[in-house]
Amino acid sequence: MNIFFKASLVILFVTNTKSSDLSEVLQEEITKYVENGESANVTKVIELLFDSLKDDHTNNNAYCVSCRVVANTAIAMRKSGADKPTLGDFITNMCKLFSFSGAKTCEGLIDISLNSWLYIIDNKNVTGERICSIRLQKRNCQDFTYVPWNINIPEGKSKILLKDNIVQVKKILQLTDVHYDPLYKPGSNANCGESVCCETVNGIPRSIDDAAGYWGDYHVCDMPWHSIQNVMEDIRNKHPDIERVYFTGDIIGHQTWATSVEGNSKTIRTFMQNMKQTFGDTPVYPILGNHEPHPVDLFPPLDTEEDISMQWLYEVIAEEWTQWLPKETKKTIRKGGYYSVLVKPGFRIIGINSNVCFTNNAWLVFDDRDPLGQLQWLADELFEAEKNDEVVHILSHVPPGDDECMTQWSHEFKRIIERFHGIISGQFNGHTHLDELKVFYAPNDNDRVINVAFNGGSVTTFVGFNPNYKIYYVGEQNQMVDYELWTYDLLQANNNTTPNWYKLYSFKKDFKLEDLNFNSFHNLLKRMSVDDSLLEKYQRFRVRNSSIIMQQPYDKEFLNNLHCDITSVEYKIPKQCKNFSRLS
Ligand SMILES: *[C@@H]1O[C@H](CO)[C@@H](O)[C@H](O)[C@H]1NC(C)=O
Ligand SMILES: *[C@@H]1O[C@H](CO)[C@@H](O)[C@H](O)[C@H]1NC(C)=O
Ligand SMILES: *[C@@H]1O[C@H](CO)[C@@H](O)[C@H](O)[C@H]1NC(C)=O
Ligand SMILES: *[C@@H]1O[C@H](CO)[C@@H](O)[C@H](O)[C@H]1NC(C)=O
Ligand SMILES: *[C@@H]1O[C@H](CO)[C@@H](O)[C@H](O)[C@H]1NC(C)=O
Ligand SMILES: [Zn+2]
Ligand SMILES: [Zn+2]
């Protein structure tokens, strides 16, 4: 490294520690790179940036600065006439230089999604600040020009329809996050250095430990078809008496650089037909995951041109889902992949497409105000349901308050739950691949739980988990009575050649609860705040007793975070949660 170059940067940095200065140096070097194509100095500044900004150990500031400079440069290039290939090359090279992703992902994903980004840049005055504050919300990147929005929520207090006495109990199955990989190959390289391995193209493994397992693998790998079939068979054998199925999204694998309209459509249809074969007349209530679109994660407004529109996806699911849903639901499914169904008098299921709030959805940069008009629709649907004395289950892929769900969206969602909590007897999520809870408290009240959301874990092992499905026991109003999780030990299965499915836990029994009324969750959270063994148990169940994860040591801070995350239903920094005595 050129010593003068480094010295001048260090002097700059030491004399004035504001990150804006390094930001300027980075901007200069990137501008030079655009002119002469030499990236060596950019690499040096990146090193320095990530070395120097140790003010936060997670390097958030360095990420925000890098993101803003790259995004602002790309926008400036476009405004001054850069064509698609030039911009594609620039962003791809930056993605690689900053190691934002593996090379294959940088190249493939940018190639696939560039048209959408260009449309956004060409049709809105976007800034790097806006892009990065959304994309890197988790890293707390700021945009001081952001103007929050609100939906109209009907005045009044929630009707309380839920009753405590339960006579008859029924079973519901939840399946989620399948992530099927058609290219999975047992014995292939599971440790390949890309963001997904275990495929034929990943070559020969270096050691026996790196060979992809027959049923799946703890490395960054998705599921082969025979493993998905095996889950279906186990459910059919053990639970022929389920009343209905909730499928909470993510069918497509993590090969985000290799998706296509044809490929995704085929996989979605194949999986839906497989569910029909497995469950026969038992109704399935499916929703979309963020992996179903091509390009992945993108949910554009409805009036966009054909080459960037997601209408093809809505048409596919409108057709497939109405194998189970009434034909009338096609109307809203075609407008954004959401629906509301009266299952029987007094009980409704609302399936939403919460993927619009996922911070990877580039269209939030274009316009984040209630995408697809969906939250307003949800509030209106719940208002109607309340008038008609209907109890509701809400299915949503992205959990409330997820750190990658845009804050303003999750704030409005929380307002909706607060207004209608007394008619919502359960929420069901996926996406995190973790079997976890989100518990809503009444505003400014540390003692009253008003709603609970349950996450289904995942069928896929991605990353390090044992595959699972969940069975919920519900009363007449579909209030939660108990639930259990079924799984198998992946290492043992790969060793023995067959999965040995077993019930990992029964929630009521394992946490010693009298019932699963909202107040019982409050009592459990209070017990968890003073009893680490309960949180350790929650963690064990959360990852389905995966030996590879349970081996890793964790500290008090990890458990504190785990506790905090349960009551954090609106993501902000610092986190919004009910910590009781844990952290005081
Ligand atoms: C890199 O920086 C050094 C020191 O400022 C300079 O001499 C050199 O020309 C730069 N290289 C490029 C390719 O810009
Ligand atoms: C962007 O801003 C400029 C200057 O304020 C304005 O002339 C232009 O119409 C804007 N473009 C869009 C697409 O809003
Ligand atoms: C795999 O099988 C061998 C031989 O039966 C046994 O010794 C070993 O403990 C098994 N490993 C696992 C993870 O089940
Ligand atoms: C969890 O896995 C370990 C082995 O990794 C096993 O000894 C233990 O019994 C399992 N616990 C449960 C609750 O299944
Ligand atoms: C814990 O919660 C209390 C009350 O909600 C709050 O005042 C306090 O700042 C929280 N502590 C932490 C560390 O989050
Ligand atoms: Zn997923
Ligand atoms: Zn997902």
Image: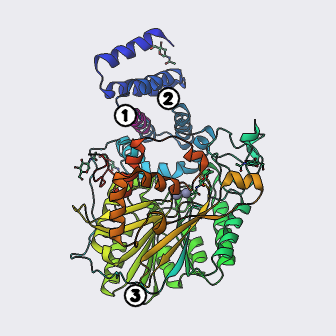
Q: Which mark is residue 34?
A: 2
Q: Above or below — where is 88 with respect to 447? A: above
Q: Is residue 353 visible?
A: no
Element under label 1?
helix
Q: Which of marks 2 and 3 is in front?
A: 3
> Counting other residues with Cα less than 10 Å from the Cα at mark 1, is it few (<14), some (14-19), or many (20 or more)?
many
Q: Position of residue 545 (x, y in %)?
A: 57, 54
Q: How many marks?
A: 3
Q: Give the range drawn in magenta.
A: 59-72
Main SS of residues in magenta: helix
Q: Earlier in the sequence, mark 2 or mark 3?
A: 2
- Residue 324 image-quadrant placement: bottom right
Q: Residue at label 3?
A: 346
- Rounded to the nearest angstrom, the CA distance separating label 2 from label 3 is 62 Å
The three-letter code of the residue at mark 1 reads Asn
Q: Above or below — where is 76 with respect to 34? A: below
The three-letter code of the residue at mark 2 reads Val
Q: Where is residue 466 in the image (x, y as percent from the top left)?
A: 61, 55
| Quadrant housing the C terminus | top left
- Rounded to the nearest angstrom, the CA distance separating label 3 from label 1 is 51 Å
Please name the residue shown 32% across and 17% down the image: 14
Q: Position of residue 32 (x, y in %)?
A: 46, 24
Q: Earlier in the sequence, mark 1 or mark 2?
A: 2
Q: Residue 61 carries which label?
A: 1
Q: Can residue 456 be seen in this view?
A: yes
The answer to whether mark 3 and mark 1 are in CB contact below 8 A is no
- Residue 269 image-quadrant placement: bottom right
- Residue 63 image-quadrant placement: top left
Extreme residue in the top direction: 4
Element under label 2?
helix
